[in-house]
């Protein structure tokens, strides 16, 4: 808005015209007149309508959503439909004391499985007496295949648990992916409730201290609760149509509360500053043209950062990105409409009987910090850089993994059962792979049998292969002879018990055991190489199993990250270039964000590698660095844009770089610190949750925000801007 427009607003306060308030768009010269009562009523209706659906959100959430759409999924389907191997079954682990007789153990197992037959959600039961390899000393296990409707899984699992009755000296426990995921969902909901109680209360205290009045402090809290509650209702409606990751339940409150409160803090703080010097309407107008513009710029950068996550072709990332983008959009609309409406209602009441504050009284400490940093830009810049590099050192030791039962607390029953199952029936140095040979016709022909036999022999001679289990080993008959036997119906029926686990129409199952853990680079390279051979060789085959699943998850993420990263960096650079009309500032801002992220990743790796602060030592869940990058990169832009907007505002008025930097840093220091404190207050409680991934997300975001708001924004950015001087504002063909 031009100066003339501002003067006219000052002469006749628009907030007093027929109950209207002024909500000024960030586009120069555009003014939108909105009835404050209408705005408040509209958001009240929004909260009532969508908030009524919010409690139902957990009922439509699925598991983590790390489902690659590749060979693994195809093999899982074939194993279930053709070879009667349930997809992601519930595992019943039986354990007996040595004194228990085998017949007594057998009777207990049969009785337990008989009880399972009356459960509606169970589609198939695989008894340990039906297959080899399901007994190991005092341990055995059975598989319960669940029906496809995963929304009913918790009910089915509760029914199973009620029917499990341990006997004297015999125990039975339940585990498997559906059980573990249900426990993770339950723990995530508990983590969310605890984090909300602590985080909202802590954030309110921070805002109260920042504003000094309860009424103003309630505005960011109200905005945060409306944005989170409304978005959770929207996501419930969306979840009835598409699959949503259970991580949505944690990410939406974390992102929604943090961003909406930060945006509200920026608007209200700037309004208080302007309201000391101008009438209500003019103060609102200036606030929305300055802080409102910064909020919209920040939100655009955050939105682009979340959009980059959509490049990763896994349901987890798409559902998380969509949820975060929706809560961001709701937060921005609340900030640009409801907050001015509330301020226009509350400010006259708050201001009556209130003594004006001395101008800039609260900035003394930030003036001192600004002066200290700007007098020593080289030393302060070097110290900040050395600190950040030190934080980045543990990055070389960061290990990422696909989350499993170890995400749960060590004493969780499903985790204990899973660890016993793994220890008794699987070697940590071995990876089991399913290989499905497919013929082009409806039945395997002689050439298919010969090619399959050649493939099995090749696998047995592979130094990376420990064991191969196939129909050729089970019958010890040459492929030509086996083909002839398959043509005789009577002979085929005779050998049906031996053939059934390996042959189904035009498909042959081969079980391969590799040397190495499922996540080892050696196993993953072997799978990638064999996958290429399965497409190009004489006989077509597909690969599946846990090792293949992990390899596909890793590949989907790491192949997509360069494209996502390129999109985020280029799009954010373009937005900042247009906003600040500088070539160097956007580049420097992006580099600063990357430094704070690298430092936070290093701290995260250090904490969980060493098991510090009571954390269980272990690897980082593979999706956590991606989430932290997508979320924190945009949130860091929030602080960066707010600081640069204030510096740019002063520079346009004075054309004095040093004065602009000092004034911008001093005027925004308290706000950025308060905003960071809010963000940390909202995210740190997640670090005390039960689920490892939730802990890592909370610690990673809190560490990144702390570093960004202190070392980066308060020290490194002003030091570099002081050293670069007028080069900060250079751009080709830029008009003065």
Image (tube, rainbow, N blue to C red):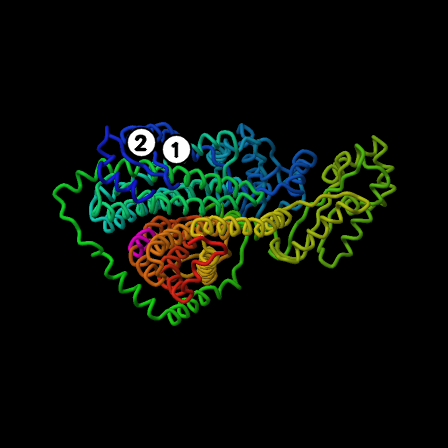
Q: Residues within 10 Å of mark 1 (few under 14, many from 20)?
A: many
Instruction: Pick whichever, 463 or 207, lies toward us.
Output: 207
Q: In screen coordinates, is 177 left or right of 48? A: right
What is the C-alpha distance between the residues marked 1 and 2?
28 Å
Q: Secondary structure at mark 1?
A: helix
- Residue 130 point in image, percent of width and height: 66, 38
Q: Are marks 1 and 2 in contact (CB under 8 Å)?
A: no
Residue at point 17% right, 54% down?
Answer: 358
| Residue 670 highlighted magenta (yes or no) | yes
Instruction: Pick whichever, 195 or 465, lies toward us.
Output: 195
Residue at point 71% right, 50% down?
Answer: 512
- Residue 580 point in image, percent of width and height: 42, 52
Q: Main secondary structure of the magenta part?
A: helix
Q: In screen coordinates, is 502 left or right of 295? A: right
Q: Compared with residue 277, is residue 619 higher up or lower down, i.e. above or below?
A: below
Residue linked to disc 2: 34
Direction left: furthest residue? 353
Residue linked to disc 1: 54
Give the mark count.
2
The label on residue 643 is none
What's drawn in magenta, residue-wise? 668-676
Task: For residue 163, say whether it is visible.
Answer: yes
């Amino acid at each position: 808005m031009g100066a003339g427009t501002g003067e006219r607003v000052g002469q006749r306060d628009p907030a007093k015209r027929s109950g209207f308030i002024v909500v000024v768009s960030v586009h120069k010269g555009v003014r939108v007149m909105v009835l404050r009562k209408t705005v408040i009523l509209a958001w009240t209706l929004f909260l009532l309508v969508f908030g009524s659906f919010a409690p139902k959100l957990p009922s439509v959430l699925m598991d983590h959503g790390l489902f690659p759409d590749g060979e693994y999924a195809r093999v899982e389907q074939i194993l279930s439909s053709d070879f009667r191997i349930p997809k992601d079954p519930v595992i019943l682990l039986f354990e007996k004391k040595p004194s228990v007789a085998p017949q007594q153990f057998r009777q207990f197992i049969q009785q337990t499985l008989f009880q399972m037959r009356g459960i509606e959600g169970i589609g198939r039961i695989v008894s340990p007496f039906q297959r080899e390899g399901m007994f190991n000393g005092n341990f055995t296990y059975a598989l319960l295949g669940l029906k496809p409707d995963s929304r009913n899984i918790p009910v089915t699992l509760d029914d199973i648990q009620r029917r499990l009755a341990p006997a004297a000296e015999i125990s039975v426990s339940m585990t498997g992916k559906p059980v573990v995921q249900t426990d993770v969902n339950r723990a995530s909901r508990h983590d969310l409730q605890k984090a909300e109680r602590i985080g909202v209360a802590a954030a309110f205290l921070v805002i109260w201290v920042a504003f000094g009045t309860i009424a103003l402090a309630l505005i960011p809290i109200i905005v945060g609760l409306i944005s989170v509650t409304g978005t959770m209702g929207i996501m419930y409606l969306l979840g009835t149509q598409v699959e949503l990751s259970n991580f949505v339940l944690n990410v939406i409150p974390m992102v929604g509360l943090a961003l909406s409160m930060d945006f509200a803090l920026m608007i209200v703080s700037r309004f208080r500053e302007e309201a000391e010097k101008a009438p209500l309407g003019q103060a609102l107008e200036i606030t929305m043209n300055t802080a409102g513009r910064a909020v919209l710029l920040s939100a655009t950068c955050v939105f682009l950062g979340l959009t980059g996550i959509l490049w990763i072709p896994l349901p987890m990332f798409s559902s998380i990105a969509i949820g975060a983008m929706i809560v961001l959009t709701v937060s921005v609309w609340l900030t640009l409409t409801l907050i001015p409406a509330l301020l226009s209602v509350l400010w006259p009441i708050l201001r009556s009987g209130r003594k004006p504050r001395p101008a800039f009284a609260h900035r003394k400490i930030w003036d001192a910090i600004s002066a200290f940093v700007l007098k020593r830009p080289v030393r302060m810049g070097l110290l900040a850089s050395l600190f950040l590099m030190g934080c980045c050192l543990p990055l070389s030791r960061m290990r990422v993994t696909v989350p499993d039962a170890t995400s749960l607390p060590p004493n969780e029953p499903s985790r204990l059962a899973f660890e016993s199952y793994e220890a008794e029936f699987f070697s940590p140095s071995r990876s089991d792979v399913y290989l499905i040979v497919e013929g082009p016709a409806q039945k395997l022909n002689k050439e298919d049998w010969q090619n399959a036999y050649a493939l099995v022999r090749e696998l047995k001679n592979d130094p990376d292969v420990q064991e191969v289990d196939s129909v050729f080993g089970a019958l010890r008959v040459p492929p030509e002879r086996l083909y002839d036997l398959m043509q005789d119906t009577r002979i085929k029926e005779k050998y049906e018990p031996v053939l059934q686990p390996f042959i189904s129409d035009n498909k042959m199952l081969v079980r391969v055991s590799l040397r190495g853990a499922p996540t080892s680079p050696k196993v993953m390279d072997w799978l990638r190489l064999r996958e290429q051979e399965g497409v190009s060789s004489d006989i077509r085959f597909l690969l599946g199993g846990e090792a293949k699943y992990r390899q596909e998850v890793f590949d989907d993420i790491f192949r997509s990250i360069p494209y996502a990263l390129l999109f985020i960096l280029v799009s954010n650079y373009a937005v900042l270039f247009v906003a600040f009309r500088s070539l160097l500032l956007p580049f420097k801002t992006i580099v600063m964000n990357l430094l704070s992220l690298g430092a936070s990743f290093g701290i995260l790796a250090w904490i969980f590698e060493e098991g510090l602060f009571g954390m269980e030592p272990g690897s980082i869940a593979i999706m956590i660095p991606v989430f932290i990058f997508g979320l924190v990169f945009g949130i860091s832009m929030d602080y960066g844009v707010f600081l640069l907007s204030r510096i740019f505002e002063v520079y346009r008025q004075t054309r004095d770089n040093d004065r602009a930097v000092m004034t911008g840093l001093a005027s925004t220091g308290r706000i950025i610190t308060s905003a960071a404190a809010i963000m940390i207050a909202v995210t740190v409680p997640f670090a005390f949750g039960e689920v490892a991934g939730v802990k890592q997300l909370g610690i990673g975001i809190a560490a990144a925000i702390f570093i960004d708001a202190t070392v980066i924004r308060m020290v490194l950015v002003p030091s570099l801007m002081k050293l670069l001087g007028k080069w900060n504002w250079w751009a080709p063909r830029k008009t003065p």
